[in-house]
Image (spheres, rainbow, N blue to C red):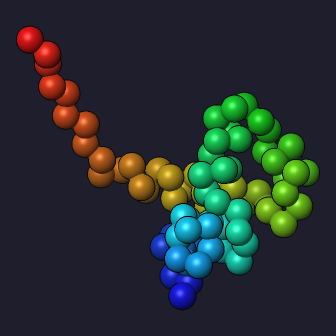
């Protein structure tokens, strides 16, 4: 049962253990973010994953930004 959770991003418990993936693929958003964090260029990602488009990568970034938008971090001091 696929469910769209953001523009171009969906989840399905039967695909990648329910992790967010690019719509219509088995390519996890997490993998795209990790590659970008490793300073792998968008062009190189597109070569490695020909089913992806620049818009797919943009959608992954937008989903990640929305996911942490309301996140709060509470610091606890150790005494």
Residue 24 location (% of width, % of height): 71, 77
Give the quarter of the figure containing the C terminus. Answer: top left
Most foreground residue, 50 or 54: 50
Most foreground residue, 54 or 2: 2
Does residue 8 appear in this view?
A: no
Residue 30 location (% of width, % of height): 60, 52
Most foreground residue, 53 or 19: 19
Residue 68 location (% of width, % of height): 39, 49
Q: Is residue 41 above or below residue 53?
A: above
* Residue farthest along the top direction in this orientation: 79
Residue 6 location (% of width, % of height): 51, 70
Give the quarter of the figure containing the N terminus. Answer: bottom right
| Quadrant hosting residue 74 | top left
Q: In this image, 30 relative to 78: left or right?
A: right
Counting every numbered tag in the picture gives 0
Q: Is residue 24 above or below residue 28?
A: below
Identify which residue is drawn at 62% across, 46% down. Answer: 33
Q: In this image, 12 relative to 43: left or right?
A: left
Identify which residue is drawn at 72% across, 31% down. Answer: 39
| Quadrant hosting residue 62 | bottom right
Identify which residue is drawn at 84% across, 66% down. Answer: 51
Identify which residue is drawn at 76% across, 57% down. Answer: 54
């Amino acid at each position: 049962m696929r469910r769209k959770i953001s523009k171009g991003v969906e989840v399905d418990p039967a695909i990648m253990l329910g992790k967010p993936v690019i719509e219509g693929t088995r390519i996890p958003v997490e993998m795209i973010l990790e590659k970008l964090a490793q300073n792998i260029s968008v062009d190189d990602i597109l070569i490695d994953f020909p089913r992806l488009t620049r818009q797919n990568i943009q959608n992954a970034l937008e989903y990640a930004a929305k996911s942490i938008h309301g996140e709060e971090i509470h610091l606890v001091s150790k005494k």
